Image (tube, grey):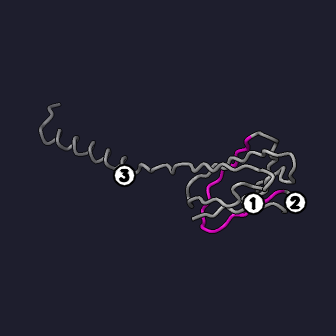
Amino acid sequence: MKLTISMIIAVAVAISGASAFAKGKEQKVPQEQVVTMEVTDEGFVPAQVKVKANQPVKLVVTRKTARTCAKEIVIKDLGVNKPLPLNQPVEITFTPTKRGQVRYACAMDMIAGVIIVE
């Protein structure tokens, strides 16, 4: 089979079109937002944090005191109820999809804070 210039051009156009289509389909992966928090004698510190909607969040909570009822973290809106062992970071990952406030608290609901989703 003899290749003509028009065949070569047609193949080149098809390849470049496929390459442009593939590039158009690439999606940027949102960067994970890491929020660190401690449980101290004053409660959750900080008690209010801000994150961006539609971006993954990694909340890292470390309980630094034994004199607290915040030995668990409960985030009802996310279905989270995790123990907070002393001096051990606990990771909670989620992706907030709507703006507003997400409340978190100890299991007794006495010590609390909010995640503000912007």
Q: Is residue 118 left or right of residue 67?
A: left
**Amino acid type, label 1:** Tyr
Which residue corresponds to the image point at 61% horizontal and 63% vertical from the top-left?
117
Question: Quadrant of the rendered structure where residue 113 is?
Answer: bottom right
The local secondary structure at tag 3 comes to: helix
Residue 116 badge:
none
Question: Quadrant of the rendered structure where residue 6 is?
Answer: top left
The local secondary structure at tag 1 comes to: strand
61 falls in the magenta region: no
Image location (x, y in percent) of residue 86: 81, 41
Image location (x, y in percent) of residue 115: 66, 61
Q: What crowding class fits label 2: few (fewer than 14 Cα within 10 Å), some (14-19), or many (20 or more)?
A: few
The quadrant in which the C terminus is found is: bottom right
Gap in angstroms between the C-alphas marked 2 and 1: 11 Å
Spot the residue most to the bottom: 100
**Amino acid type, label 3:** Gly
Q: What crowding class fits label 3: few (fewer than 14 Cα within 10 Å), some (14-19), or many (20 or more)?
A: few
Q: Which residues are magenta?
A: 89-106
Look at mark 3 in the image and give the residue it sits on: 24
Look at mark 1 in the image and give the residue it sits on: 104
Which residue corresponds to the image point at 15% horizontal and 34% vertical from the top-left?
3
Of the residues tagged 3 and 1, which is closer to the observer?
1
**Amino acid type, label 2:** Met
Image location (x, y in percent) of residue 61: 72, 47
Look at mark 2 in the image and give the residue it sits on: 108
